Image: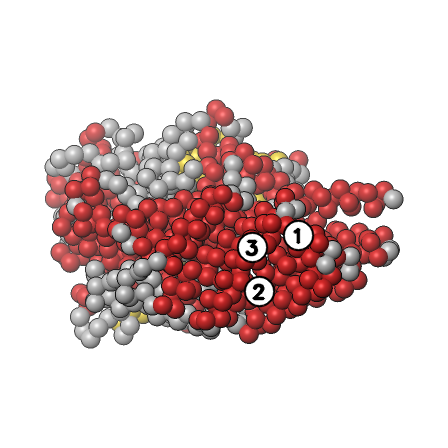
Amino acid sequence: MNVSPGAEHGGPHPSLVPGSRYSQTNKAGTSFLVQHGDMEVNYRVAERPQEMGDGQSTDAGGAGSQPLFTNDFLPCPPSRAVFTGRSQELAAIRAEVDRLERERHGVAVVVLWGMAGVGKTALALTAAHELKGRFQGPKEFLNLRGYSDTRPTPTETLAALLSQVAKISASQIPTGQVERARLWRSWTSGRQTLLVLDNVQDCAHVQQVLPGDGKHLVLVTTRHRTGLHLLDCTPLHLEPPQAADALRMFHQAAGQDADHIEQDALAGLLKQCGHLPLAIRILAARLRGSSADLHRILAETSQAESPLQGLDDFCSSESLAVSALFEASYRHLPRSTQRVFRLLGLHPLGSDFSVRAAAALSGLSPTLVGKKRESCIGTHLQRLCDASLLDIVALPSAHHADVSYTMHDLLVPFARGKVRPATTHKAIDGMLDHYWRTALERSASAEPSLTRHVRPRVEPHQPPSRPEPTAGNNAPVTSSRTEALAWYQRHRTHLLACLDIARLKDEARRKDKEWSDCLDLWTIRLTSAMAGPLRSHGPWDQAAARHAAAADAARRLGDRPALAVALNDLGIINRLRRLHNDALKALSEAELIFSGELPDHITPEDKKLGQANALNEQAIVHNEEGIEANDEGLFRRAATLLQRALALYHTIGDGIGTANATKNLAVSLFHVGLLQQDARLRDTALRHLDTAGEGYKDVGDELGVVEVLNHRGILLEKAGDRREALADFNSVLEPAGQVGSRLELAKAWDGISRCRETIGSTSDMVVQALEMAAEIYAEIGATAARQQVAARLIRFRRD
């Protein structure tokens, strides 16, 4: 249940050995060396028997073989050495792209449909890599996991597209599906994109995520034709290969080992397996380099007891034969490797897991310790790759710091069906522990710039065998906010899938309170570790649901400190959603808990910190309400709360908390002074704002400094000091670009345009600032702000 702490991709483990040792290609596959501690493991990426397509899973696997995004790059294509055939289908896809180029705009949708394992994804990726040079915009691979319990809804898919492809901030992503689809079409309009939508259950899902007018190719893979009539598309039905093609595929996969195999017996075995490409590949691996008797394997395929899950389109005898072939390959493995194979089937996505994730699931070491090869996960990953029961998703690159592996979606239920119930909980616990530690370390390295405040240390008690990760209250930022968020985006699907496991309410959980409590604990831990990225990247409606679930879990466990933290996180998200009443309800309860009696392991400093954070957030809500209602009473209420928060922050020496509260107090006092026409109070507020800026500098929060400058410009503009406001807005431009805040940059250009207009600058200077603001607002999806700027642009150009 315990694994060594360490980031999943935190360094060169396992690292690809450079130079001439990188790869060697032969008929049987591509080999490369990976270092597992002191042990070199020779991995072979078996050439894919794809005369008619894929049928196995690297990234080119079937359903469930990839997380939702592969982060601005396409997965490895099937090897050209063995990808033959499919010429008619490839020609049809090329013809669609030719049509696009003749017409210069449009959306070409090609739907590849057929049974699992027939090679749909391999064909899509082969075409995508061939044609990607003809599209200048994003090239994305999305696994929609249509045949798994973790499949995303169209609304969630759109949120991922807007966040991860369009790079639109969470604050600008609308909550409704219709609004998100409209924003996605608007962003893609005029652009060129290539999308691979893999494992689609219903083509109606595709309709919701199609890009806008431009030049776009959308390749869809699905098992069924459901919803196909809704799309203006080119449907291509993929069948398993014919007998001659299947034999050729086998020989390409097996290499020289196939030269002495009796061809009639082989043809009979391939026919018995329905010529399924995945089965051909596994059979080639089973016979490659071994003395296995083909007639014995042929007999084994007639002895399966139940058909294979996922082969509904096969006749029962063919499904039984494939199931038996899987069983024979599984039994051929050493017992220790059989155990690893079973446990890997428990991974929530069944795909794209790293060496360390596999080690956590199996309880083995990610590196070689002494000469104990069986205790190193690399030994077993190599065996499974050699048997074609596991595949390489990606080699180390700019996108992957580690080797990643995947299991075909037909093999996942086969593996899970063999897991012994007694080992399930321990394996899942180890995996959740791994992902939690990884997320916590990544988040802690960039705090407090992610959550924008220091979080009180209230982690629930852990067994002594699991030392707590260390993260001091005012620890210096050791990696940038941008780097931490980029890591989160790469692993978001895995982390959320782990959260989904922790929230399961199945029968076994109801019967086993100890296991139920354990899953509640993981819900709290994982959600807390993801609080910063959830705030930054959202989508905020989903983030609110995650924090609410963590609060519910804490209530069930009776863990009041964890409940208070979850409520504070929930309140922040609801404030960002402009749900002020919901935000105040959660934040008030969090404050009440922190101000009351708590367990002895919660220090007085952490109690004060939690209380101060809740007070500060309540004050922000009242400030926002005051601005909307022009209500002096709300600003005064906010100021009272902020003075209490400041006293607590000063007591515990929390620099960023002090800066946050001082900045918010400046907003409160300035608006009171504005409403009372009290210039001295406004000046006092501006001094508070300057103090907040210095405070952010002291703790190294560059984004906070930028926010203060924009705040100052807005307040001075309201007071009529537009030349000084213009100077503040101008001073934002360089640091906003350095910290990567497009929103703050757009706000600055917007403010510059307003100030230039009122001080009598030339129309060209005003238009220049408006154009800059409009362009950035459009990029980040700030629709309302963009529309306001666009209206002003039209007026200035007309005048």
In the rendered structure, find residue 638 and report the number of the disc placed on it.
Answer: 3
At label 3, counting other C-alpha atoms closer than 10 Å, the crowd grade (few under 14, some 14-19, many 20 or more) is many
First of labels 3, 2 by sequence position: 3
Q: Which residue is mark 2?
A: 662
Image: 786 above or below 440: above
Image: 65 above or below 107: below
Name the residue rendered at 86%, 56% in the picture: 760
Name the amino acid type tagged 1.
Ile
Name the residue rendered at 16%, 52% in the picture: 423
For this orientation, the residue located farthest to the top is 229
The answer to whether one can see residue 642 in this image is yes
Q: Which residue is mark 1?
A: 776
Name the residue rendered at 63%, 44% in the picture: 629
Name the amino acid type tagged 3.
Ala
Give the colouring mode of the picture: secondary structure
Residue 704 position in % (x across, y down): 57, 64
Query: Tag 3, which secondary structure?
Result: helix
Give the CA distance from mark 2 to mark 1: 29 Å
Q: Which quadrant would the C terminus be assigned to in this image?
A: top right
Q: Nearer the viewer, mark 2 or mark 1?
A: 2
Q: In the picture provided, is 338 more to the left or to the right than 455?
A: left
